[in-house]
Image (spheres, rainbow, N blue to C red):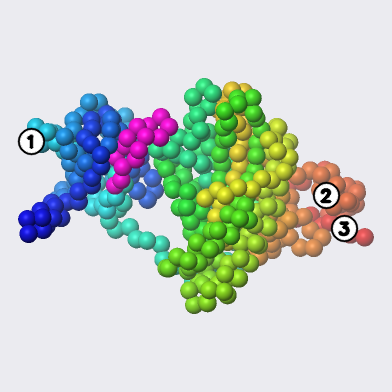
């Protein structure tokens, strides 16, 4: 009976989370992403803590047993990152426990967990704050995903790592998450200049997005392609070069089996078509067909991107590689991972920090993407509507001699048919390619 009463009191006052021992709080870091705000308390060891919310005004209270603050615990210098957190306070309770109070801008739904040491970080208490009025995305119907007439091709550009996850560290301390974001933003800028194409960023700031949420965000944006940007690392600093990866077939098969086995997770798997009303065999066949087509498209665009990167500098391998990366497992969105360079190589680390070189990488990635979609434009897009047999849409980087070489037609013949007085061609112009 006593144990029952203790349980009731615990549930009334908040949720108790247990861990190994008490610890000192050394630091507070806050990041705001589009869908949540993350607060991280750096600890000297694991802790026992209790978390609950209060209203009027909105507050989040974290009680940490037998702990104290030994460092800075405020938002000084973090104003632009604080998101839903407007202020933070702390005080001792009963001369033993530590209470940390977050003043909130609005009502929130908190989630929390402990992290063990990893990389440069020690023990951490992580608190994620979601707006209370946010809703989970609903399952799309077939009607929802029908493309609008002559829509733009959508490219989801993902900057690897971010926030609590710095990624690989360069020979001189450069964090992978910094250079990937800089390059991803330049890729988006380059794609947005392409006729009939636009890009969306999976993350546009220094915050972490779980791997599976990355490709789910791409699917929610109805992306035609998902590209995640990284910077490789190796113990041997002399290793260098770019690489392009797609999902391995083994990884695709295991992901398909997992998705089909999960109750409530079979809807909206292949372009908005639900598999919930299909038997297991038929659902498996449909999903495998979808994934096979997706992998074929992924491989084609990956080859185009690798070819473009080879014009910028050395590539680690002269072929597209495959691996079981979690962020490449979308069943219906072609996906590739670009390792721009080895950040562990001092020379490549220096180039990765150079905005001019970042633009070269971004231009190469964009060139490969453009080449793919000009050859294989998705139905219902502006590119598809303007790519007819015997026509070519002029893209950035195209030259008249290059177009002539691609179609094995003399330059003079293209100029004659299109009534061109010189070799100047305009981006977005549609050229008639003579045949016979």
Residue at 79% over, 43% down: 399
Label 1 crowd bin: few (<14), some (14–19), many (20+), radius 10 Å: few
Disc on res. 434: 3
Question: N-terminal of the two: label 3 or label 2?
Answer: 2
User: Quick one: 246 or 73, which is closer to the camera?
Assistant: 246
Q: CA distance from mark 2 to mark 1?
A: 78 Å
Element assignment for label 2? helix
Asked if residue 416 lies left or right of residue 386, the reply is: right
- Answer with left or right where residue 382 lies relative to residue 418: left
In front: label 1 or label 3: 1
Tell me whether circle 1 and circle 3 mark residues in contact (CB < 8 Å). Answer: no
Horizontal and vertical percent position of residue 54: 16, 50
Which of the two labelled residues, at mark 2 and mark 1, occupies the earlier sequence position? 1
- What residue would you read off at disc 2? 406
Q: Nearer the viewer, residue 216 or 198?
A: 216
At x 28%, y 30%, the residue is 44
Which residues are drawn in magenta? 112-125
Q: Can residue 398 be seen?
A: yes
CA distance for labels 3 and 2: 13 Å
* Quadrant of image for the N terminus: bottom left
- Residue under the image location 69 percent in, 45 percent down: 320
| Location of residue 150 (image quadrant) | bottom right
- Across and down, in percent, residue 224 comes to 59, 57
Tell me: residue 423, above or below residue 299: above
Q: Position of residue 306 (x, y in %)?
A: 69, 42
Q: Which residue is mark 1?
A: 94
How dense is the environment of label 3, judged by Cα within 10 Å: few (below 14), some, or many (20 and up)?
some
User: Secondary structure under badge 3?
Assistant: loop
Is residue 203 found inside the magenta-colored segment of the image? no
Residue 45 at x, y percent in the picture: 28, 33
Q: Nearer the viewer, residue 115 or 135?
A: 115
SS category of the residue bearing label 1: loop
């Amino acid at each position: 009976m006593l144990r029952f009463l203790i349980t009731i009191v615990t549930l009334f006052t908040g949720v108790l989370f247990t861990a190994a021992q008490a610890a000192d709080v050394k630091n507070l870091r806050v990041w705001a992403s589009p869908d949540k705000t993350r607060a991280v308390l750096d600890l000297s060891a694991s802790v026992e803590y209790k978390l609950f919310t209060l209203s009027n005004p909105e507050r989040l209270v974290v009680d940490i047993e037998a702990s104290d603050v030994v460092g800075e615990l405020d938002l000084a210098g973090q104003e632009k990152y604080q998101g839903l957190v407007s202020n933070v306070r702390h005080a001792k309770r009963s001369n033993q426990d530590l209470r940390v109070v977050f003043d909130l801008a609005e009502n929130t739904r908190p989630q929390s967990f402990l992290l063990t040491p990893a990389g440069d970080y020690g023990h951490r208490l992580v608190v994620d704050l979601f707006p209370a009025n946010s809703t989970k995305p609903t399952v799309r119907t077939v009607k929802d995903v029908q493309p609008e007439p002559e829509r733009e091709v959508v490219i989801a550009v993902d900057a690897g790592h971010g926030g609590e996850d710095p990624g690989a560290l360069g020979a001189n301390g450069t964090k992978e998450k910094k250079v990937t974001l800089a390059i991803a933003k330049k890729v988006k800028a380059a794609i947005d200049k392409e006729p009939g194409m636009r890009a969306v960023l999976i993350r546009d700031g220094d915050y972490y997005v779980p791997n599976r949420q990355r490709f789910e965000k791409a699917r929610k944006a109805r992306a035609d392609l998902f590209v995640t940007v990284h910077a490789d690392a190796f113990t041997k600093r002399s290793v260098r070069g770019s690489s392009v990866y797609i999902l391995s077939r083994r990884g695709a098969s295991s992901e398909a089996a997992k998705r089909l086995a999960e109750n409530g997770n079979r809807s909206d798997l292949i372009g908005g078509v639900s598999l919930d009303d299909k038997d297991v065999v038929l659902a498996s066949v449909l999903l495998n067909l979808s994934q096979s087509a997706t992998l074929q498209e992924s491989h084609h665009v990956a080859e185009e991107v690798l070819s473009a990167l080879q014009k910028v500098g050395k590539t680690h391998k002269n072929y597209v590689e495959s691996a079981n990366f979690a962020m490449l497992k979308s069943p219906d969105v072609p996906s590739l991972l670009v390792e721009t360079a080895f950040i562990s190589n001092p020379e490549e680390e220096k180039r990765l920090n150079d905005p001019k070189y970042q633009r070269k990488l971004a231009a190469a990635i964009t060139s490969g993407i453009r080449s793919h979609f000009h050859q294989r434009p998705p139905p219902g897009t502006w590119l598809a509507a303007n790519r007819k047999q015997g026509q070519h849409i002029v893209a950035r980087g195209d030259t008249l001699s290059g177009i002539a070489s691609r179609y094995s037609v003399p330059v003079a013949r293209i100029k004659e048919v299109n009534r061109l007085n010189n070799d100047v061609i305009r981006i977005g112009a549609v050229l008639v390619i003579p045949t016979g």
